[in-house]
Amino acid sequence: MSTSAEQFDRDARGEFARLGRTRVHRGELLRHPVYTRFLHWSVAIFFILSLLTGFAIYSPWLFRWLAPLFGGGARTRALHPWFGVVFEIFFLFQFINWFGPMAWTAADRRWMRRIKAYATNEEKLEAEDVGFFNAGQKLYFWVIAVSGLLFLITGLLMWFADSMPRWIVVVSYVLHDIAALVMLGGLIIHIYEGTAHQPGTFRSMIDGTVTEKWAWTHHPAWYRAVTGRDSRDAYERERRRQRERQRVLEEGERDMRESS
Ligand code: HEM
């Protein structure tokens, strides 16, 4: 990434930090600053608008009920490429924002070999070497980057179809639709991962914070980097705390039974 892009990203983070606020309480860590949250939700909104208008164009029979939401068939067709262009612009800024933490490492290759255990929740804790993003998250990011490029090229070719050879337009339709289906599949998994599969993740994109427990459970290497503490120690401390709590509860119940 060029230094001017990095400088732009740093300046934007600074500007947005002044516009919005992120409160980090005791026992919490800052995960996503205001600028990152702004970009994420802008990308998400314009991607979903592109998806909905795209579906209405792709299959008017199945998605007939979608076109009226955007002012009818003709307007839906006219709006779709513009939603797509705005999505591309926001994603470009998000790409610059996350390019660093999305770099693929040896730890990610090891994570991919454990993907089944991750999906089935076999392990209580992530491996020690999982950093700010795990390999699954990085994969999703790079799928969006490649699909985004494909959307842009094929979208422009279809937009200006009159001045293109027919076969190029036909191939563009196929590639555009394949990219959209891949992205839809990815989005369904992404929403599940960001909400139900990992409770405590969704708030990171709302108020920007996560609990320390969330951090040492899912991203131990990141936890170690920002706190200087070991995730295994934190886990053992938490287990001792829970055992002690359980013991006190049981003692209390026993005392109550004996005194009644
Ligand atoms: C609409 C529902 C969505 C929800 C609930 C959601 C939720 C989240 C959350 C909570 C994170 C932070 C994960 C973390 O810090 O570990 C995140 C990250 C991310 N989101 Fe979304 N998101 C949504 C839509 C989208 C869309 C439409 C896109 C792009 C087309 C997108 C792209 C990303 C990417 C690339 C990341 C970073 C990698 C990852 O965590 O997978 N998100 N999202």
Image (cartoon, rainbow, N blue to C red):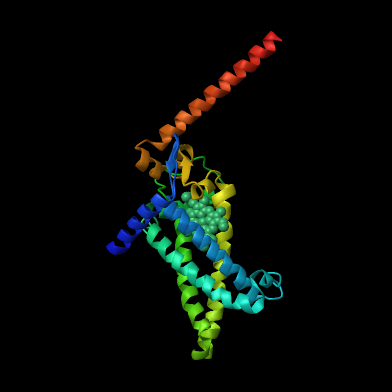
- The residue under the point 57% across, 64% down is 48
- Dividing the picture into quarters, in which one does residue 234 lie? top left
Q: Position of residue 181 (x, y in %)?
A: 58, 69
The tally of labels here is 0
Res. 110 in view: no
Q: Along the horizontal axis of the image, is 159 left or right of 61?
A: left
Residue closer to the observer: 225 or 42: 42
Q: Position of residue 184 (x, y in %)?
A: 58, 64
- Dividing the picture into quarters, in which one does residue 2 lie? bottom left
* Residue that lies at the very extreme toward the top in this rendered image: 259
- The residue under the point 48% across, 64% down is 143
Q: Along the horizontal axis of the image, is 131 left or right of 4?
A: right
Q: Position of residue 151 (x, y in %)?
A: 50, 73
Q: Along the horizontal axis of the image, is 11 left or right of 234?
A: left
In which quadrant of the rendered image does the N terminus lie?
A: bottom left
- Dividing the picture into quarters, in which one does residue 255 lie? top right
- The residue under the point 66% across, 77% down is 73
Q: Is 33 drawn above or below residue 185 in the view shown? A: above
Res. 5 in view: yes
Residue closer to the observer: 256 or 40: 40
- The residue under the point 48% across, 37% down is 213
Q: Is 62 drawn above or below residue 168 in the view shown? A: above
In which quadrant of the rendered image does the C terminus lie?
A: top right
Residue closer to the observer: 24 or 211: 24
